[in-house]
Image (cartoon, rainbow, N blue to C red):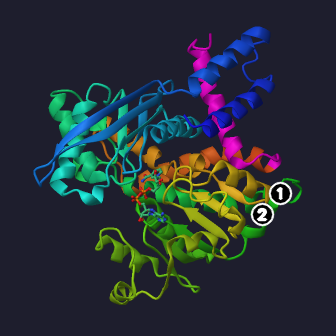
Amino acid sequence: MEEETKKIIQESLDALYEKKEFLPDLTDGVRTQAFNSLSAIISTPNNIHKSFLRVPREDGTIERIPAYRVQHNDSLGPYKGGIRFYEGVNEEEVVNLAFLMTLKNALHQVPFGGGKGGIVINPRNYSEKELNIVSRKYVRYFADVIGPDKDIPAPDMGSGEREMDWMMAEYKKIHHGKPYLGSFTGKSVVNGGSLGRREATGKGVYFTFRYMIHDYVLAHKEQLENSINPFSKTALAHAERPLKMAVQGFGNVGSVAALEAYHCRSLNNQVIAVSDRNVTLFNEDGLDIPSLVAFTSSNRGDLPKDEAELDKSGIQAEIRGRDELLTLPVDVLFLAALEDQIHQGNMEHIQAKIIVEGANAPTTRVADEYLDNQGVIIIPDILANAGGVIVSYLEWLQGRETQYHEESEVFRLLLEKMQETMDTILPQYFGDPYPLRENCFIHAVQRLSTVLHKQGKLY
Ligand code: NAD
């Protein structure tokens, strides 16, 4: 696990150690020992599974592709987390992401633990037939450690419902006659998926921003006006006026968050820039997001990347350098692409006063601290991007009962859950000087630690 992640865990545990009302029956040496146990348990995963998937390519060559399944902690329920199809994925990254899943589920009270998978490929370089083999081999190699009550994968970067459908089919074949619908989430609806799963993360990301900066702030205006917390000032300054927004990444998460912002007319917000792996598109008067979504869906997911494609799309925009988006003069920046996007090298040029983390870990720790000190509100991944896992949980439940909700019901349950979490976190956040990420981590570690204590694991 990365040193930075270990530091965050230790800081949360240190804060809880001082809180005498937390696990009050643990005192003196026993308390110290229990916290040492907590630190050891949380900062290491339970299992790291690694395999090399043997895949015959269509050109006759054979590849052995590294693949991981990391199971961080299952004290709160079966391991749960996506499988990333990405050429840059490595063991340490998967471990960190699995840890983040444990805390995310703890924070939102989803009865799952934390896991994550990774396959080291660039899916764009593989044919559909080859990807099918890769997906099935992944299941075959990890068949004994995954399953509806053990470890439930889902899509992540580079994978989607097509891969989950293939994977579930392979799981069903291997575990013939056993329950299989809950073995993977993020499946297509005809194959046992939940309505609304595809949009869940992006919807949740936008909702978190809207509820926190608009609904919550207006409902607690007086409390925030009297608060000495610098973040309260930032929130109040942005609650009642139209905001300019930029969205980095226009995939599953970013495109839906952008669409939500576009349709949220009641707030008069404008999405003036979006970017993907190739370009930034900019329009000071607001981009036509529905047309961009329509274009990307017929262009292998990519935004128009040159003047010819832009003309073809009929969209009014300027093409700018991919990373220019991050430093544009906007109020709100949604990060929905990759990790480590705001770092020491660009943090001083960030103009947004609110950053919403749709991607996992898009802000480095140094940049995080720097921006916190500037009073910038960073709505962290653990809070903002949990929509996917919440609806995955609903999919898993629906699969158990083979009773499916209407889409509107799925969204109602999703937003209700996210609001519940925020109603627990925000009063404290606006009342004390700690950044939101720290607040969320402390809450999540507190829940996990309580369960570990009750399960008699802190010896
Ligand atoms: P995706 O593959 O659908 O989309 C990724 C987007 O980012 C694409 O538009 C791609 O072109 C763009 N991109 C890649 N490199 C970029 C760069 N350097 N600059 C700008 N854009 C770039 O992936 P996704 O499912 O939307 O996931 C995005 C992030 O959100 C990932 O970090 C993922 O782990 C996280 N996340 C996803 C979900 C989910 O349900 N999909 C849930 C939680 C977290």
Residue 214 visible, this orientation: no
Residue under the image location 49 percent in, 27 percent down: 45
Asked if residue 365 lies left or right of residue 248, the reply is right
**Is the residue 271 above or below the residue 397 in the image?**
below
Point out the residue furthest to the front here: 61
Residue 125 at x, y percent in the picture: 26, 59
Label 2 beta carbon less than 8 Å to ligand 1: no
In this figure, which residue is indicated by the disc labeled 2? 234
Quadrant placement of the N terminus: top right
Residue 89 at x, y percent in the picture: 41, 46
For this rendering, which residue is in front, 233 or 64? Answer: 64
Quadrant placement of the C terminus: top right
Asked if the residue at tag 1 contacts the one at tag 2, i.e. Cβ–Cβ closer than 8 Å, the answer is yes
- Residue type of the residue flagged with mark 2: Thr
Start-end of magenta stretch:
431-459
Which mark is on residue 230? 1
Residue 305 visible, this orientation: yes
